[in-house]
Image (cartoon, grey):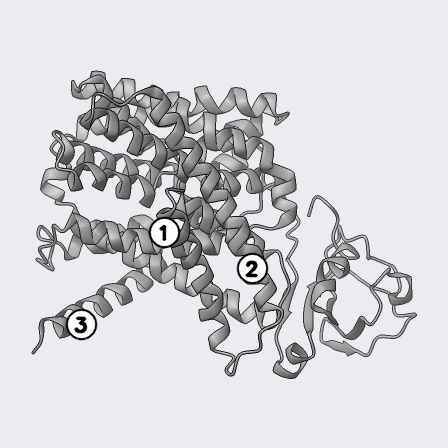
């Protein structure tokens, strides 16, 4: 048997265990990333699997590719409305919020672990950003609905603050390894990372949408692959031009996700599954990389630093930003609490290992412990915190969904399904009173156990499931007829 055969078998078994473990997340209130990490740790050298894995370079490579998939998928699911609602506070949190949290946590790490200043700040930078995969996962599986502006701010912050954490980590490593580095060099690095990343993301996103609307591929199955490759291209191009590949990938995802093209729904479902596979692979590999017996050697110090991060550093930095951005005290408290750490800090903690820096193993183990505490404590208590703060909305508003039929898609049209809520502006109106775009047809209404063939005089009621055929580019105009701004 070839060595690769053994690797394939183990990979399949661990991935299947990871998928099955996700079933336990809503039942026990444990974030799914902790379960994936647990699968890796159980399979590792100190667990029942006895698999020895200590290749930091391989873990970094796998983690990077998985993050590309996760951030691209996060961009695809970030609506234009969410960006309009939350871009200002999210931008402040993703920059000044990360810097402030990193500095306060880094000073605490320096004192608690007796580290030199720069190495303490390095640990703070590594855990300075919230994690998109963790936040998306917790918000999806929480079983509650929170106000749209809070949800948008949390998701946009977590998806966009990784570049700042990566910049701070690389900058501090540069300062530690080369004492001749000047502040102006770091400013130049920052401008390059953010500027090039943003430009590449916008350019590749625009080119991708232009191609998607004009190129007809020979097989439907090629469309998801075609779309995914532009996310990978965006990262690779930006990274090779000394820009932030993660920022470029996310921006490309946002542009693609807010455009309309054929087979879009099926493409996005496939890419969401691919992002989940990336999460499983990344967290299991990171779980394999850590040695549990070494992880808990510094558990007291790790617990203290986690306490400072969760209860002091993030609230002290985030609360003023949010209050100045006209969030309520309760909303600010909830956003402060949902500052989950996940895969990005662990991957950044691999950097000192790769460079062979002093204290590298200590930093990695403490960061891993902080991530576990953050995910278990903050992730599992999100529903409780939201209810205690009175920020859980009673009425559930379901987003419209696209039902893709090949012949409809080929004609540059799509069939969408909309469920009417009690908040809908279309409630109690007739079909004829709706300001639907030209060439849009209400094909059918499902009302309870009845199926109605709609007429212009048909009145819309709560709970109606309305099936509409419209042009690809007219979906947002159709949705405006059925959804309020706050939905």
Q: Secondary structure at mark 2?
A: helix
Precedes in sequence: disc 2 or disc 1:
1
Q: Nearer the viewer, residue 7 or 137?
A: 7
Precedes in sequence: disc 3 or disc 2:
3
Image side of residue 374 versus residue 350, left or right = right
State which quarter of the image contains the N terminus: bottom left
What is the quadrant of residue 274 in the picture?
bottom left
Reply above or below: 455 against 283: below
Q: Are marks 2 and 1 in contact (CB under 8 Å)?
A: no
Badge 1 local density, few (<14 within 10 Å), some, or many (20+)?
many
Image side of residue 459 versus residue 357, left or right = right
Q: Secondary structure at mark 3?
A: helix
Q: Position of residue 67 (x, y in %)?
A: 36, 51
**Of circles 1 and 3, which is in front?**
1
Precedes in sequence: disc 1 or disc 3:
3
Q: Can residue 30 be seen by looking at this rendering?
A: no
Image side of residue 380 versus residue 39, left or right = right
Identify the residue at horizontal 16%, vertical 38% (top origin): 355
Image side of residue 258 versus residue 142, left or right = right
Q: Can residue 13 be seen by looking at this rendering?
A: yes
**Of circles 2 and 1, which is in front?**
2
Q: Position of residue 423 (x, y in %)?
A: 75, 50
C-alpha gap between disc 3 and disc 2: 39 Å
Q: Which residue is mark 1?
A: 67
- The label number, if any, that marks residue 9 in the structure image: 3
- The label number, if any, that marks residue 207 in the structure image: 2
Badge 2 local density, few (<14 within 10 Å), some, or many (20+)?
few
Q: Secondary structure at mark 1?
A: helix
Q: Position of residue 234 (x, y in %)?
A: 44, 54
């Amino acid at each position: 048997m070839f060595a690769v055969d053994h690797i394939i078998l183990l990979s399949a078994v661990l991935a299947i265990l990871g998928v099955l473990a996700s079933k336990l997340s809503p039942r026990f209130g444990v974030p799914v990333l902790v379960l994936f990490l647990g699968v890796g740790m159980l399979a590792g050298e100190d667990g029942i699997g006895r698999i020895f894995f200590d290749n930091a370079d391989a873990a970094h490579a796998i983690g990077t590719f998985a993050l590309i998939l996760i951030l691209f998928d996060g961009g695809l699911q970030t609506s234009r409305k969410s960006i309009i609602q939350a871009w200002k506070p999210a931008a402040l949190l993703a920059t000044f919020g990360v810097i402030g949290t990193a500095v306060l946590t880094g000073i605490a790490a320096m004192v608690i672990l007796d580290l030199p200043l720069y190495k303490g700040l390095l640990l703070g930078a590594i855990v300075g950003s919230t994690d998109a995969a963790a936040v998306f996962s917790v918000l999806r599986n929480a079983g509650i609905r929170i106000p749209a502006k809070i949800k948008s701010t949390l998701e946009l912050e977590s998806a966009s603050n990784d570049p700042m954490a990566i910049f701070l980590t690389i900058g501090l490593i540069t300062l530690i390894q080369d004492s001749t580095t000047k502040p102006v060099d770091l400013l130049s690095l920052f401008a390059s990372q953010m500027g090039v990343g943003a430009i590449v993301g916008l350019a590749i996103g625009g080119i991708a949408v232009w191609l998607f609307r004009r190129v007809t591929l020979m097989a439907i199955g090629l469309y998801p692959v075609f779309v995914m490759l532009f996310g990978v291209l965006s990262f690779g191009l930006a990274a090779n031009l000394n820009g932030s590949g993660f920022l470029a990938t996310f921006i490309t995802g946002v542009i693609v996700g807010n455009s309309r093209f054929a087979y879009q729904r099926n493409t996005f479902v496939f890419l969401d599954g691919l992002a989940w596979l990336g999460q499983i692979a990344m967290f299991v590999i990171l779980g394999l990389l850590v040695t549990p017996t070494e992880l808990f050697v510094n558990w007291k110090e790790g617990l203290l630093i986690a306490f400072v991060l969760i209860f002091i550093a993030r609230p002290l930095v985030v609360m003023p930003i949010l209050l100045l951005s006209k969030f309520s005290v309760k909303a600010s408290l909830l956003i402060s609490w949902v500052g989950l750490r996940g895969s990005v800090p662990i991957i950044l903690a691999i950097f000192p290992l790769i460079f062979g820096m002093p204290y590298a193993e200590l930093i990695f183990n403490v960061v891993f412990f902080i991530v576990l505490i953050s995910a278990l404590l903050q992730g599992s208590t999100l529903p409780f915190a939201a209810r205690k703060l009175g920020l859980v909305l009673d009425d559930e508003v379901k987003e419209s969904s696209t039902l893709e039929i090949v012949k409809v898609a080929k004609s540059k049209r799509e069939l969408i399904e909309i469920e009417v809520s009690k908040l809908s502006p279309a409630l109690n109106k007739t079909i004829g009173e709706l300001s639907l775009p030209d060439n849009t047809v209400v094909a059918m209404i499902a009302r309870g156990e009845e199926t109605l063939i709609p007429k212009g005089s048909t009145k819309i009621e709560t709970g109606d499931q309305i099936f509409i055929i419209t042009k690809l580019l007219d979906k947002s105009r159709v949705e405006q007829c059925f959804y309020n701004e706050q939905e």
